Amino acid sequence: MSVEKKNSFLYKTNQIWKFYLASSYGFVIYLIWRYYKLKEIEEGLVGNGIFIGALLFLVAGVIIFCFLLFGLQCPSCRLKVGFYYFKKSRFSKFFEDLLTFKICPRCSYDPSQPDV
């Protein structure tokens, strides 16, 4: 993990696991689809796998995105930082901004500073 990510807000507030969980969830959905597709090929059925795969990816994408938007929050003011950065930053920079910000944009909570 890079130094920049270790200095990030999510890492210092122990919420980085939520990002990794969301990322791995997509991979698990892919493995489920591949298993279903291989089973379908063994049985000689073709055609439903594309529909099931597309549906799984659509559902997984919505769940992962909602998890990132509403699951990451500031421990001080409870701002949903995922949703905040989704609204404020360009979509191409959403993940970069989400992984590298250092203080809460609303209350300026800095997890590296000791509590007073």
Image (cartoon, rainbow, N blue to C red):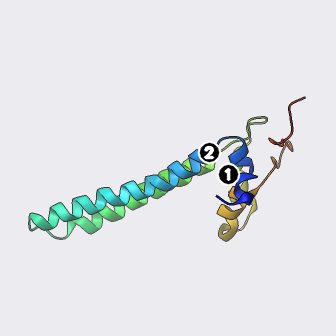
- Dot placed on the residue nearer the N-terminal end, 2 or 1: 2
The spot of residue 33 in percent (x, y) is 30, 60
The residue carrying mark 1 is: 83
The residue carrying mark 2 is: 70
Left or right, 88 with reference to 36: right
Q: Residue 51 appears in which quarter of the rendering?
A: bottom left
- In this view, the residue in front, 8 or 38, is 8
The spot of residue 48 in percent (x, y) is 21, 65
Number of other residues with Cα within 10 Å of mark 1, as a class: few under 14, some 14 to 19, many 20 or more: some
Above or below residue 70? Residue 85 is: below
Contact flag, marks 2 and 1 (Cβ < 8 Å): yes
Q: Secondary structure at mark 1?
A: helix
Left or right, 95 with reference to 33: right
The spot of residue 82 in percent (x, y) is 67, 51
Q: Residue furthest top?
A: 116
User: Label 2 is placed on what type of residue?
Assistant: Phe
Number of other residues with Cα within 10 Å of mark 2, as a class: few under 14, some 14 to 19, many 20 or more: some
